[in-house]
């Protein structure tokens, strides 16, 4: 069975690899404006952050923390 620590370590390594690939290919990573759906953006901009987080989680399958950070980042733009 894989522990949380092992999973976090794997994710960290994958993120480093993805960053390396973007740098190697001289490509720009997509920003939130391209990864969030129109529905999530509209909810976040209208001040309905909780619903935006819920929809983002449904669309992506991500955890609560990741969804919250994504929605809060969008509201800061």
Image: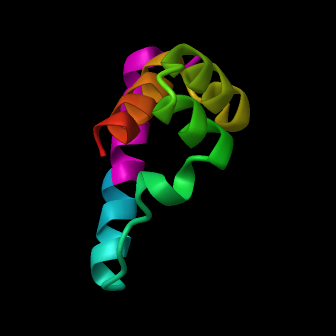
Towards the viewer: 58 or 44: 44
Tell me, yes or no, if residue 76 can be seen here: yes
Towards the viewer: 58 or 6: 58
Vertical placement of residue 6 versus 33, above or below: above
Residue at the image point whose x is 36% and y is 85% from the top: 25
Tell me, yes or no, if residue 7 can be seen here: no
**Quadrant of the rendering where the N terminus is positioned:** top right
Q: Residue furthest front?
A: 46
The kind of secondary structure the magenta stretch mainly shows is helix
* Quarter of the rendering containing residue 11: top left
Vertical placement of residue 15 versus 4, above or below: below
Residue 26 in picture, x, y percent from top left: 30, 85
* Quarter of the rendering containing residue 2: top right
Residue at the image point whose x is 58% and y is 38% from the top: 42
Vertical placement of residue 2 versus 19, above or below: above
Residue at the image point whose x is 72% and y is 27% from the top: 58
Vertical placement of residue 19 versus 50, above or below: below
Residue 21 in picture, x, y percent from top left: 37, 73
Towards the viewer: 23 or 65: 65
Q: What's the magenta region?
A: 1-15
Residue 14 in picture, x, y percent from top left: 41, 50
| Number of callouts | 0
């Amino acid at each position: 069975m894989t522990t949380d620590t092992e999973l976090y370590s794997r994710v960290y390594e994958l993120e480093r690899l993805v960053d390396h690939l973007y740098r190697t290919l001289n490509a720009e990573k997509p920003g939130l404006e391209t990864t969030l759906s129109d529905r999530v953006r509209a909810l976040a901009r209208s001040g309905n952050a909780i619903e935006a987080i819920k929809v983002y989680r449904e669309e992506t399958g991500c955890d609560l923390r990741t969804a919250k950070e994504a929605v809060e980042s969008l509201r800061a733009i």
